[in-house]
Amino acid sequence: MAYRRKVQVTGGGTFLVTLPKEWADAVGIAQGSTVLLVPNDSGALLLVPAGTREKNRCAIPMNGREPVHLQRDIIARYIAGYDVIEVIGDRIRPEERRMVREIAQSLVGLEVLGETQGAVVLHSVVNVRDFPVDQTIRRIFAITLAMWDDAVAACTARDEELARDVAERDGDVDRLVLLVARQFGLLLRDLLVEEELKLSRFQFHHYQAVADQLERVADHAVKVSRATLGLAAELLPAVGDRVRQAAAASREILTGAVRAFEDRDVPLANRVLAEKERKDTLAGWAQAAIREQPENAHPISIVMDSLLRSREYGFNIAEIALDAAVPLGHAIGEPKTPRSRA
């Protein structure tokens, strides 16, 4: 429901606007109450009643819930930006408590605040200002790139131990991506977070999109590692060279795209996107590798497909870089000056 009010002016020149009584009653505003007024990047002015942010809690029933369903529900509420998540039941068994604790440990900053027979209370201790999203994206990218380098090395050397290590690191990426998703959820629920982050929802949306693309790249590094475990024999030198060539081409696309996004570098983003035409060349490498070593056809096809898909995610990031470079009319904080890399 929208309310329309006329602006009035006092004798001293102060502007006045009345508040709707039904809304004021609903949020507990009375004579003498204090409210917070926050300018928004769109030019709007946000009015926040005192105590609104303290009500940011929810409850999840435990009874009859499968572990995977409970995990999904907790993660969903973590992403939605709830500060307190209470898991409740008639009597929560020790193994159920252990399960809740393990779920909390998989999420950045979610801690067990208290336990009773009928409840486990989780509390987010993360302050969004402690995790600048640009630094989080750099960390996600660094882990993802290391996973890819090691996945390709494991594949070409048929190193099963290294392949398993790559798969284990995927959880580190997932935790950071969920943290970015939580910050975005908080921005959507609480516009005051814009003031804390000095970043608008529109700007943060681009970081969220890049984090999502990098998560998919990390997932394909895991697929390559699992394909390595399915190799019937060590790759022939020529096949290994083709895999490394395809990996290097995809890596160049990905690193260029991320640089373009970080620097809001439009010329670099366009140069990255110009490489889309080389898809047929990489597909030819994949077909040649399969012909040269048919006993490894299935794992090789998985590896090459993942390399091609990761390349496509790089192109997606380059397109996000172009979107992010568009200046905002009412940006919060100082705009970042694009730098061009010749």
Image: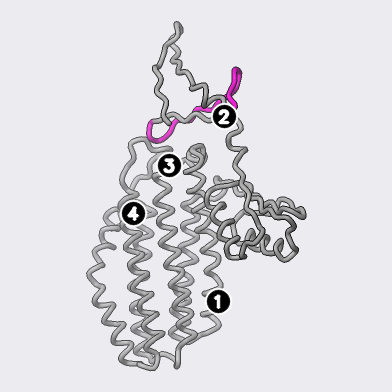
Mark 4 vs mark 3, CA separation in Å:
16 Å
- Is 54 in front, or is 38? 54
Residue that carries the numbered disc 3 in the rendered image: 200
**Quadrant of the snapshot with the N terminus:** top left
Residue that carries the numbered disc 4 in the rendered image: 321
Mark 3 vs mark 1, CA separation in Å:
37 Å
Left or right: where 206 falls relative to 280: right
Mark 2 vs mark 4, CA separation in Å:
41 Å
* Residue range corresponding to the magenta coloring: 26-43
Name the amino acid, label 1: Asp
Left or right: where 324 falls relative to 204: left
Pointer 4: residues within 10 angstroms few (<14), some, or many (20+)?
Answer: many
Pointers 4 and 3 in contact (C-beta within 8 Å): no
**Comes first in the chain, label 2 or label 4:** 2
Mark 1 vs mark 2, CA separation in Å:
52 Å
**Comes first in the chain, label 3 or label 1:** 1
